[in-house]
Amino acid sequence: MVTPVIELSRIEKEYPGVKPLDKVDFAVRPGEIHALLGENGAGKSTLIRVMGGAIKPNGGNMTYLGKPVSWQSPKQARAAGIHVIHQELALFPELSVAENILVDAQPRNGLGLISGR
Ligand SMILES: Nc1ncnc2c1ncn2[C@@H]1O[C@H](COP(=O)(O)OP(=O)(O)O)[C@@H](O)[C@H]1O
Ligand SMILES: [Mg+2]
């Protein structure tokens, strides 16, 4: 079977009085697009923050490209290739989707200009 790009196994995250992530299993394989659906407070943002390195889970395992990972920061996850695009207040409507995704890491050409390619 194809190695998942990212795989979460029995991920747990608990806050005082609430446990939004209770042994969550989730995997994304190459080329897949997933939509994570759930009511307000279901734990969607918490799960994304775990994958993006913004919070550490209390339990469970995560692999990225087949290797165990435990992100120490969003910067570390980003350097590995995980970009989190937040939906609220942080998008530039006049830029393309690609430009929004790479807004903090615009690829440059030999002249130091942003590379359209
Ligand atoms: N930093 C935090 N401290 C305490 N509770 C939190 C924190 N972040 C999220 N929660 C709680 O965890 C649950 C899941 O929140 P969240 O992941 O934001 O849900 P969703 O994105 O699906 O609406 C909610 O009950 C929320 O109040
Ligand atoms: Mg949310």
Image (cartoon, helix red, strand yellow):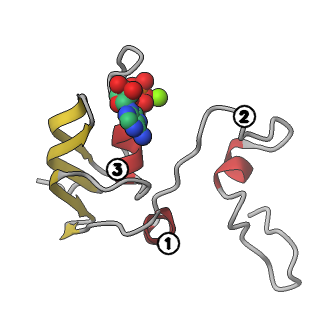
Q: Quadrant of the C terminus?
A: bottom right
Q: In terms of sequence position, does the residue under pointer 3 or pointer 2 come before the other?
A: 3
Image side of residue 78 versus residue 43, left or right: right
Look at 34% across and 66% down and name the residue there: 71
Q: CA distance from mark 2 to mark 1?
A: 24 Å
Please tell me whether residue 66 is drawn above or below residue 32 in the rendered image. below
Residues under numbered marks 2 and 1 in contact, where contact means CB atoms less than 8 Å apart? no
User: Is residue 14 visible to us here?
Assistant: yes
Look at 79% across and 68% down and name the residue there: 115
Residue 89 numbered mark, or none? 2
Residue 61 at x, y percent in the picture: 15, 57
Q: Amino acid at mark 1?
A: Ala
User: Is residue 35 visible to us here?
Assistant: no
Secondary structure at numbered mark 3: helix
Q: In terms of sequence position, does the residue under pointer 2 or pointer 1 come before the other?
A: 1
Q: Mark 1 — residue? A: 79
Q: Amino acid at mark 2?
A: Leu
Residue extending furthest toward the front: 16
Q: CA distance from mark 3 to mark 1?
A: 15 Å
Look at 72% across and 34% down and name the residue there: 89
Q: Observer-nearest residue: 26 or 116? A: 26
Q: In terms of sequence position, does the residue under pointer 3 or pointer 1 come before the other?
A: 3
- Cβ of mark 2 under 8 Å from ligand 2: the answer is no
Residue 64 at x, y percent in the picture: 28, 63
Secondary structure at numbered mark 2: loop
The quadrant where ligand 1 appears is: top left
Q: Amino acid at mark 3?
A: Val
Residue extending furthest toward the top: 39
